[in-house]
Image (cartoon, grey):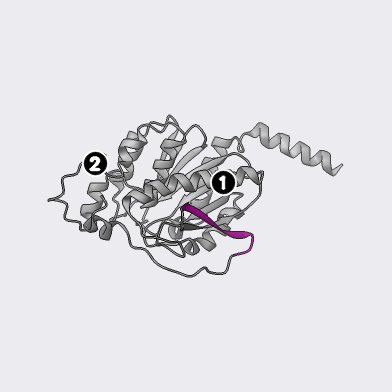
Amino acid sequence: MDSPEIQRILFHPRVSEPTPVPPSAEDLGIEVEPGVTIGCRFFAAGKDKPTILFFHGNGEIVSDYDEIGLEYMRYGLNVVVTDYRGYGWSDGTPTFSNLLADCHVLYNELKKMLTERGYRPAIFIMGRSLGSASAIEVAQAYQDEISGLIIESGFAETLALAKTLGADITGIDITEEQTFNNVGKITKITKPTFLLHGQRDTLIPLWQAEKLHAESGARVKELQVVPGADHNSLISIGGKYYFMAIQQFIAKITGDSDWRNQRKKFKNKQALAE
């Protein structure tokens, strides 16, 4: 998987200087190994809110999510968007091996930061497209610590995706288990899992999401198909319902949507007002 042929197909890094930080956001630099720092952007809605650790798609960088990050905040969610090596203002060169290694460091360092700052210990791991590999890797490794997994436009089979992207893998002796193996890993994840996918996605066809959903080891799992959406238009077509679906999934898992909790919060507000 670290062969030049596969690297050219899997990764399309965009280099960018740091951009102005949006209101209520901050940039974070996470050192994944000596001399290699990954850029992240943290959108903070509040210390009492759940947090999403978000691994973005290929060809994207953290600043592409400035408006999206602010929208998550409007829905009462913190979100940390992470880059990969060689993307945005991050150091290094992306490879299969360091993508999987780095996501462990990013998770542990960002969790440590949230804990030290007094944020609520409700962390959801989310990955879009290529980022689904990092998200599923983290969710499998730390499912005793996280609250849930969210996958947008994710893939089950790496070899099928490589063929779709035009890779000639006929001469490469490799099995699915030697790749990202999302489908194999998700069978071991029992935390609540929410998958979103575009009905008209031709880059990562809908059957890939259906396979992830079918093979998921979670008792609580849902696949939301966005009608008319392709690989990159879930938000533009779904609009507010995209964010509402994610918010409702998280609220159901954290108990924030429980009517007893809502009633208790309402009574507390009344008592403070008197």
Query: According to the image, label 2 marks what residue?
Result: 176
Q: Is residue 207 visible?
A: yes
Q: Where, by quadrant of the figure, is residue 214 drawn?
A: top left
Q: Residue furthest left?
A: 171
Q: Residue furthest front?
A: 34
**Numbered circles on residues, count:** 2
Using the image, tell me which numbered label, if any, was put on residue 14.
none
The residue type indicated by label 1 comes to Thr
Type of secondary structure dominating the magenta stretch: strand
Any magenta on residue 185? no
Whether residue 225 is visible here, answered yes or no, is: no
Which residue sits at x=70%, y=35%?
263
As rendered, which of 168 and 256 lies closer to the eye? 168
Rendering quarter of residue 209: top left
Report which residue position mark 1 lands on. 51
- C-alpha gap between disc 2 and disc 1: 32 Å
Q: Which residues are magenta?
A: 22-33
**Residue 36: x, y in percent?**
45, 57
Residue at 43% x, 29% y is 219
- Quarter of the image that includes the C terminus: top right
Residue 114 in the image: state x and y as whole percent. 60, 45
